[in-house]
Amino acid sequence: MLALALGARRLAADLWFVRLMQYYGTRELQEGEAEEPYAWLLPRKPGGQDEDFHAENGEGRYPEFLPLALHVMRLDPGFSAAGLYAAGSLAFNMDRPAEAEQVLRLGIRYRPDDWKYATLLAAIGYSRSSSPEEVARAIKPLLAEKDCPVMLKQLAAFLDKKAGDYAGAAAVYADIAATSRDAAYVANARRELRLLSGRRGGR
């Protein structure tokens, strides 16, 4: 009976996570918002436009996002892919790091041995001190995990590129192009690889 109950909770968590992604996949760009989803991590260049992918990348308000994410986590605290996706989206796309920490701390409360929650929590802490290189370094261990959300890989590549680590950025983009099922991220990764192939001096 316990196994059946756990299985039902996991199935429910999967279904609610799909609903969360469908909700977040609906474009909701608000007037006056920054064009670059990670701009709050970096000094703003007046009138500048970065070539990185940012169109329809979830920069809206999405008021139901946090309640939905917390519901998924309560159904299955071990669903780390959902927790990382939700926290990363809140912190790095929607500029709501306090809510992202709320999701991660819930995961840590139920699964204190899951190092992935703590790793992303540290990255969010570095982002608050405007340290893109430290954020990139903090999330690197997550990139090798099979359930690492592509959004976090995209963030890592973006930060590597901003820091001048073109070789590191190219490696992450190559991984996205080879493994992601998201057509938009794959197209962007391939485009970035073409751009980066003309650059030298990656660390």
Image: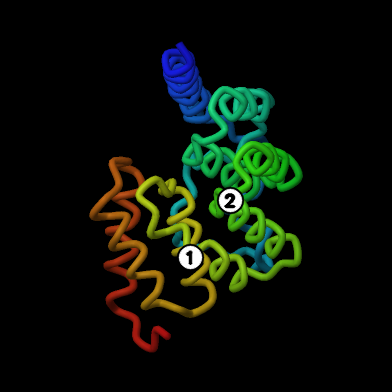
Picture layout, residue 147 above or below residue 192: above
- Please report the residue visible at 49 percent of the width from the left and 22 percent of the height from the top: 13
Query: Looking at the picture, does residue 7 appear above or below residue 36?
Result: above
- x and y percentages locating residue 161 in the rendered image: 47, 72
Residue 192 is at least partly visible in this image? yes
Q: Which residue is depicted at the point 44% across and 23% down?
A: 14
Cα distance in 3D space between marks 1 and 2: 19 Å
On residue 37, which mark appears? 2
Q: 10 Å neighbourhood of mark 1: few (<14), some, or many (≥20)? A: some
From the viewer's perspective, is 66 left or right of 86?
A: right
Residue 145 horizontal/vertical position (percent): 39, 54
Q: Is residue 164 above or below residue 25?
A: below
Q: How is the image coloured?
A: rainbow
Nearest the viewer among 149 and 145 is 145
- Report the quarter where the N terminus lies: top left
Quadrant in the picture for residue 87: top right
Q: Report how many numbered discs are placed on residues in the image.
A: 2
Residue 32 seen: no
- Which of the 4 quarters of the picture holds residue 168? bottom left
Q: Nearer the viewer, residue 191 or 118?
A: 118
In the image, what residue type sits under mark 2? Pro
For marks 1 and 2 on the same chain, the one whose residue lies earlier in the sequence: 2
Q: Amino acid at mark 1?
A: Lys
Q: Which residue is label 1 attached to?
A: 140
Residue most toward the left? Answer: 178
Element assignment for label 1: helix
Question: Residue 11: x percent and y percent?
Answer: 42, 19
Is 62 located above or below residue 177 in the figure?
A: above
